[in-house]
Amino acid sequence: MLARTADHLYWMSRFIERAESLARTLDAHYRHSLLPHAPEVVARDWRATLEALGVYELYLERHSEVSPASAFQFLAFDRDHAGSIVACLRQARENARAVRGTITSEMWETLNSTWLEVRGYEAANADHDIGDFLEWVRYRSHLSRGVTLGTMLRDEAFRFVRIGTFLEGADATARMLLARARPGFVPVDEAAGPDAYTWTLLLRSLSAFEVYRKVYRDAVTPWRVTELLVLRDDLPRSLSRCADEVYENLRAVANDQSAETERRAGQFYSAFHFGRLEQLLAPGLGAFLEGILERVADLGVRIAQDFLVPPSPN
Amino acid sequence: MIENAYDEMQLPDGTPRSHYRRYGTWLHSQAPDRLARRRAEADSRFHRVGITFAIHGENEGAERLIPFDIVPRILPATEWRMLEEGLRQRVRALNAFLNDVYHGQEILRAGRIPAELILCNAQYRPEMQGIEVPGRIYAHIAGIDVVRAGDGDFHVLEDNLRVPSGVSYMLENRKMMMRLFPELFARHSIAPVEHYPDVLLENLRSVAPVGVTDPTVVLLTAGAHNSAYFEHAFLAQQMGVELVEGLDLFVRDDAVYMRTTRGPVRVDVIYRRIDDDFLDPLAFRPDSMLGVPGLLSAYRAGRVTVANAIGTGIADDKSIYPYVPDMIEFYFGEKPLLANVETYVLRRPDDLAYTLAHLDELVVKEVHGAGGYGMLIGPAASRAQLDAFRARIIADPPGYIAQPTLALSTCPTFVANGLAPRHIDLRPYVLSGRETTIVPGGLTRVALVAGSLVVNSSQGGGTKDTWVLEN
């Protein structure tokens, strides 16, 4: 397969996944906002999210203060912000357009109609229901995933789509947890006072609340939420599951120069597969997650070097 | 203009022509709101599928639909057979001419075409002189624009031998019609067109360099911002070949390779959809970012086939067009089966004088123009436009040809207030390789503005499905 094609497929799936993750993040805030809170608590939570997403500084360049309305606008609809939901959907569509001959026509039509429809939401920006929009983004993402799994040949192209999806998934789950990890915070295994509800919301926004009940049949504690989202490799969006998929798909496309990247992906996966949560969290939840984000970024750079823009052989 | 135009559907007395009779009956039995719903459905589907094109000079990335009209253009089998024979003869002659121009130039030495018309033409590529191309085929894919004049006869208006486009609309229009009106296809015996991508692939494989048994074909595009990108992606997908950009290819030891996730892969045939000028920055425009450095050298070494060949523009140049009937006679000793449109060559003093005296009746074209740009339609022009064009012609007579304003045939077409006749043309696609193949029909383009004769999609033209009835 053409290296450029692999590059577009990889970024197409990363942007689809990123749009969905943003919708999930915003959904947690949206649900939270329906409860009574002091304004400073609301501002603190938004700030934590913007920081976890790595866009707090960029946000401050455009907005004087952290308010739910402007943060939502910035993360959902700001076309000039490359990390907004709308910008991600556009980039997913542009990448798909560049390889529309490689993906199935159903995949292309799904991504293209998502883009055509989101413009309707943009036009109605002020009027529509926030929850309704976020739900729509998630459903479109479900549809993209379904049409990919349901129509695409399990060839190399499919592998690059999967690598993009799960590398982005690992990044997103780490960031959502990071937004809950104030400096020095170590999760404990007991229901956590006034903060308890935010952990439930985190689970809900990752579609993991019912799973949690099924697995633990007990109260929601920060420790168990972390364990579920980091180590459970049967949970679709857990770090362990994502690392496993990245490793497996990377091995399937291995080439002459990718051995070191494979090794690092394997090491990344092993940390979750054979590690213990006590050890992993020893430096604190925040430091652990920062480390995860670095490794995800490193894998991203290495994958690009090995497969997506191979050096000219001349 | 419309008064003396040939109506494709109706006889002068208002009754349908025999090949439209069955369709006419069906059309009259349709409730207007059903047809309106179907038209809306076609639009939304074309949008969703992304069958769009970009227009030069508009915002970058702006994508538009080419309007699709649901009334088909129908050709009876007998007419098509005649047309097909004429097209084969013409494209055979054009390929023979290209081979001659780039080898012995006998037609020039015989004085049938003035040598300076060729040798001083920017479309003539001296780099091609003496190169042997597989099967002596230069124009592997030709789009020949044919019009029917007031007398009902077909004439060739233009040959497109560089990178003719539009065939994807022929295929998508058919798919759309079958989806919207399946009952029509049960009622008529319509020659299929769906196999075009198979024929195209087979054709490209048949002209691979000598000795290559299982050739790798790629389609070379300028990229997603090119106006015809949809078609490039569509054809590559339908043929199952890689859609490559210049940066995906490189040349080593006179062989062409593509960069893949598993290393370099050899390429044997390049179906290129970018112009000669941009193909190879080392040989042509040095500022081209779209091409492949060293491609011409690999091509000259016979290690890769480029389709269409480099330098085919010399045969579809408007200054050469008047001589195509001479080519047919010169190379085959045959009479042309398909006539040219009568053409005044303004480098000839008599033709120039006539043209200047009758400017308001004629269509004048720049010899190097294309796509409906740079032309004057005398009867539709204002006094000021006529004067301006007259000055341009006088400044450079050899730069222009003139033709009588043809009453292009009309076909009923849906417009804002119902069905109305609109002028149409036809672009059949002629594939030349080991064999010559023409998929029945082609792309019918329609001028949507009342009275307009300009069918180009870049100028607001639309398209129709084209049916060739089988007997």
Image (cartoon, coloured by chain):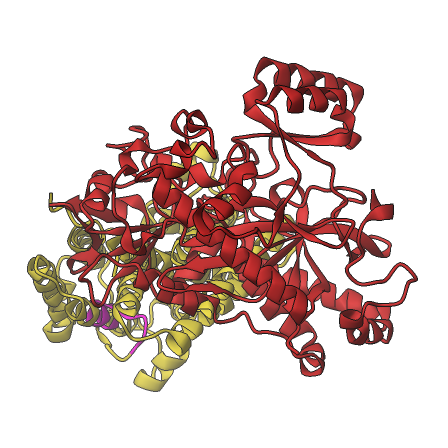
> Which hue is chain B drawn in?
red
- Where residue A35 appears, as percent x and y from the top left, is 53, 62
Please state if B29 lies on the left or on the right of B241 as rendered: right
- Where residue B116 appears, as percent x and y from the top left, is 43, 25
* Image quadrant containing the N terminus of chain A: bottom left
Tell me which corner region of the image, top left, top right, bottom left or bottom right, holds residue A268: bottom left
Q: Kindly tell me whether residue B365 is visible in this rendering.
A: yes
Indicate yes or no whether the magenta region holds residue B108.
Answer: no
The residue drawn where x is 40% and y is 42% is B312
Considering only vertical position in the picture, is A35 above or below A66? Answer: below
The residue drawn where x is 34% and y is 33% is B125
Indicate yes or no whether the magenta region holds residue A240.
Answer: yes
Tell me which corner region of the image, top left, top right, bottom left or bottom right, holds residue B283: top left
Considering only vertical position in the picture, is A180 above or below B27? Answer: above
Numbered label tally: 0
Considering only vertical position in the picture, is A212 above or below B149? Answer: below
Q: Find the magenta span and give its range.
A: A235-246
Please state if B326 lies on the left or on the right of B40 as rendered: left
* Image quadrant containing the C terminus of chain A: top left
> Which hue is chain A drawn in?
yellow
Foreground pick, B463 / A86: B463
Q: Kindly tell me whether residue A37 is visible in this rendering.
A: no
Foreground pick, A202 / A248: A248
Tell me which corner region of the image, top left, top right, bottom left or bottom right, holds residue B371: top right
Foreground pick, A180 / B262: B262
Considering only vertical position in the picture, is A141 above or below B87? Answer: below
The residue drawn where x is 23% and y is 45% is B299
Foreground pick, B82 / B27: B82
